Amino acid sequence: MLYLLNLVENQTILDHHWLAGFTSGKGCFFVNINKLKTGNFVAKLVFQLTQYSGVELLLKSFIEYFSAGNYFTKSNKPVGDFIVTKFSDIIEKIIPFFKKYPIEGTKASDYAKFWNNEK
C-alpha cells in the first residue's frame, strides 16, 4: 500500500466542498472523556482527519486552512492525524464550516450526533 502514497502529487485543499467530501471519507467527530487524577472527568469535543503519512503536507495544510488544530504522527503506524480539540475552534470554525458545506453519506449522521446530540 505504501507505493500508492507517491501518487498523491497535489497535496492542497481543492475547494470547500472537496474538504467536506474528504471529511466524509476520512473524518471523525467524537467526544473524548478522560479521568483526571482528582477523580473528576473532563470531556473534549474532537474533530479528527486521519490519513497515511504520505499526505502529511495535505493534513498540515488544514491547520492553516482552519487556523486551528495540530498535526500528529503515530509512532507505530505510517499515519498522521489533523486534530482540533480547542472548544472555541470547534464552535467558531469547524461547526460553521460544516453548516455551510455539509457532509454527505454515513458521516452526516455521525456529525449530527456530535453536534445536534441526536440519537
Image: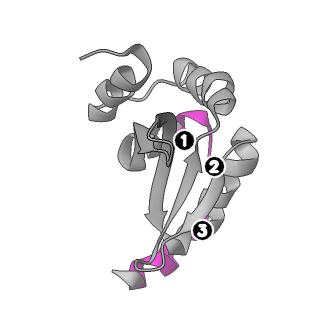
Q: Mark 3 Cα within 10 Å, few/some/many (few <14, many 20+)? A: some
Q: Indicate which disc, 1 or 2, sits on the residue closer to the N terminus.
A: 2
The residue indicated by pointer 1 is 19
Q: Identify the amino acid type marked 1.
A: Leu
Residue drawn at the location 51% of the way across and 36% of the way down: 44
Q: Residue at x 49, y 47 (%)?
A: 48
Report if residue 8 is visible in the image.
no
- What span is in magenta? 3-19
Query: CA separation, marks 3 and 2?
Result: 13 Å
| Mark 3 or mark 2: whose residue is earlier in sequence | 2
- Farthest residue to the bottom: give it: 3
Is residue 23 placed above or below 78 in the rendered structure?
above
Determine the residue located farthest toward the left in the rendered image: 119
Which x, y percent locates residue 28? 40, 43
Question: Does 1 appear above or below 83?
Answer: below
Mark closer to the observer (3, 2)? 3
Task: Tell me what residue is drawn at x 68 percent, y 23 percent.
Answer: 92
Disc 3: which residue? 56
Quarter that holds the N terminus: bottom left
Residue 40 vs residue 99, the one in the foreground: 40
Residue 94 at what x, y percent from top left? 60, 30
